[in-house]
Amino acid sequence: MNANRIWAIARKETLQILRDHRSLILAFLLPITLIFLFGYAITLDIRQIPAVVVDYSNSTHSRELIRKFTNSGYFVEIERTADQDRATELVDRSKAKVAIVIPVDFANQLTTGTAEIQLLTDGSDANTTQSVVGYASLIIAEYNSASIARQSGGRLSLSPVTLETRFWFNPDLDSQNFLVPGLISLIMTILGSLLISLTIAREWERGTMELLISTPIKPLELAVGKVIPYYIIGIVDLFLAAYVGIVIFEVPFHGSLWLLFLFSSLFLMAVLANGYLISVVAKSQQLAFQLSMLTSFLPGFLLSGFLFPISSMPVPIQIVSYVIPGRYFIEVLRSLFLKGSGLELLYLQGVALLFFAVVFSLLATRKFRKTIQ
Amino acid sequence: MPELAVDVTNLRRDFGKFTAVNNITFQVNRGEIFGFLGPNGAGKSTTIRMLCGLLKPSSGSGTVAGFDIMKESEKIKSRIGYMSQKFSLYQTLTVEENLNFYAGVYLMDSNLHAEKKRTYFAETVLGQLRDSLVADLPAGTRQLLALFCAIQHEPEIIFLDEPTAGVDPLSRRYFWEQINKLSDHGVTIFVTTHYLDEAEECNRIGMIFNGTLSAIGEPDELKRTRFTGRIYKFDSRDPWESADHLRGRADIDDVVLFGSELHVTLKPNANFDKITAAISAVDPTAQNITAIDPTLEDLFIALINEGQR
């Protein structure tokens, strides 16, 4: 290993990145776009559900119930109508996600015993429907206990035992707090594997590799020199994404920045070595792109626990997820951001990441041949 | 330092069923300019790549700069300079950045490199183009830069694969001045070329056809010893017509046109007087029928024909 040779490669690679608009866009615009896209547009919490209200009763009781719905923050009344067909039409056209229908004798029924209301929801959107039913049940339960308490003059309560749930680390169950740390891992996976997987393949395609392998350069010097600029891009993107997450999306960060840097470096090494391995094997940019999408981006997106919890996957898939570096890194990131865990709780993940980094690096440098074909 | 820069025996390379280089054996002496000639696809580049350690030979043995081509290719790589047939510098880097990069890879002394760059920039058009991107350079200038990238670290042996393809005559002159200068300093040059005038500049040449080495030696010696027939030239106003007539004759080996000039190669047993009579008979405009020494081009074409028969 000769530092001067590594430096020559790293400097050349940096100049090439700086003059290649595609690489620059991928390196700096993509992370920002992703984080804003996930931060703003994609939210897993369902709030402000558009509702159409059909109040045939039009009594103080029915108005009180409707107020409970709209004051909850979960529902927004977009239209009030006396025509149920109109309500159905709005749901059919997806203008409203739910129609709340209160029958004419609602107030009567209340005083004599059990009253019924009707919720019409759009079952093709299963997620929203589930939330609608859940929120509505809560609101109605609350309305029930309030009205019983009022009717009995405060002596009776419907629910003598109440369940008070507290969510640790993310008390409001804010999905941004859950998404942003995972997103950092995803961004670094895309950048690491995609950008670097093209570099060696590009040199084969353009013919520059033929000259490079006629020199006394060692495979490890070439690998280290090529990885350095991408490692720096990765770290810059890490702090960029973390900054946007913390400042704009108000994701709490309770851990240590040094640990964030340390674990990100380990993860980047694993991802970059994986990308470099692809690059060595592929020899064409097209193939390298497809391989890196297939082997790092897709598993990193689907099987790492970024969106879908690993614990609810089928057992064989859970086992597969153990060989995906992103799995460990996402655990670390969430712990660092939301829990502020220290090294004593995270060292196992650290060992796993280090293992991947070493294995991929060894494979990549051993696979690289300084000959044509 | 070993006497022989290149010494290979029965070097062979197969690509599937196709044999690109078929058991060639030859030597190149230290400090000589060795020209490797042959038509496209004859095996020139494959041979060069095997000598540079870029391609594993299918069989055979040999040394380059004293190192085993089968086992010590990395040692060979630190002693050679290589200019590939396909242009292979970085197009998004400038002229100077390319030079700097290869100086770094070869771990050149920085003072020596600064001096080399000064010379190159002072002597050639690259001086005004040092900050231009390589992508913007004309073909000839690119080749010049590729040459400098291959020789700046002062290697013992330099392999040039068709270095002057697409280079204008003036720059070609400069190329060959550089090559001769390096050879004067004891550097071995192994160069492939299409141009037969360039081949004349070589100390020795090897001619390769269909992967087989069919002649090797000094150019003059080859023209004398390998060219069996006698050759006559004459001028004609209608060279195509007379070539057609003469080609059919049993005592004529070949007729080749060079503009309005015809080169007629006789079979070894042919009678000169009969031929001159025949020429005058078929072509009244024939003038200045004279015996000439064969050129490398005559030899080259004769060897190709020999190979096809």
Image: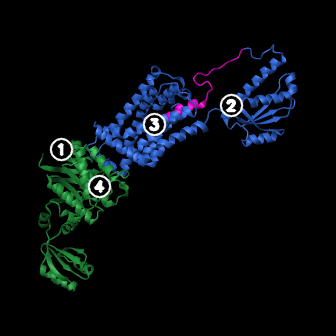
The residue where tag 3 is placed is A236
Marks 2 and 1: in contact by CB < 8 Å?
no
- Side of A172 where B39 appears, left or right: left
Is A168 covered by the magenta stretch? yes
- Residue B193 occupies quadrant: bottom left
Distance from the alpha carbon under mark 4 to that under mark 1: 28 Å
Of labels 4 and 1, earlier in sequence is 1
**Quarter holding the C terminus of chain B?**
bottom left
For numbered disc 2, what is the local secondary structure? helix
Residue B185: percent from left, percent from top: 15, 53
- Residue B58 visible somewhere in the drawing: no
* Three-letter amino acid code at the position of disc 3: Val
Chain to which the residue tagged by mark 2 belongs: A
Q: Is residue B47 above or below residue A100?
A: below
The residue where tag 4 is placed is B145
- Residue range of the region highlighted in magenta in the rendering: A161-186
The residue where tag 1 is placed is B67
Marks 3 and 2: in contact by CB < 8 Å?
no
* Three-letter amino acid code at the position of disc 2: Ser
Dot 1 alpha-carbon crowd within 10 angstroms: few under 14, some 14 to 19, many 20 or more = some
Residue A131, numbered circle:
2
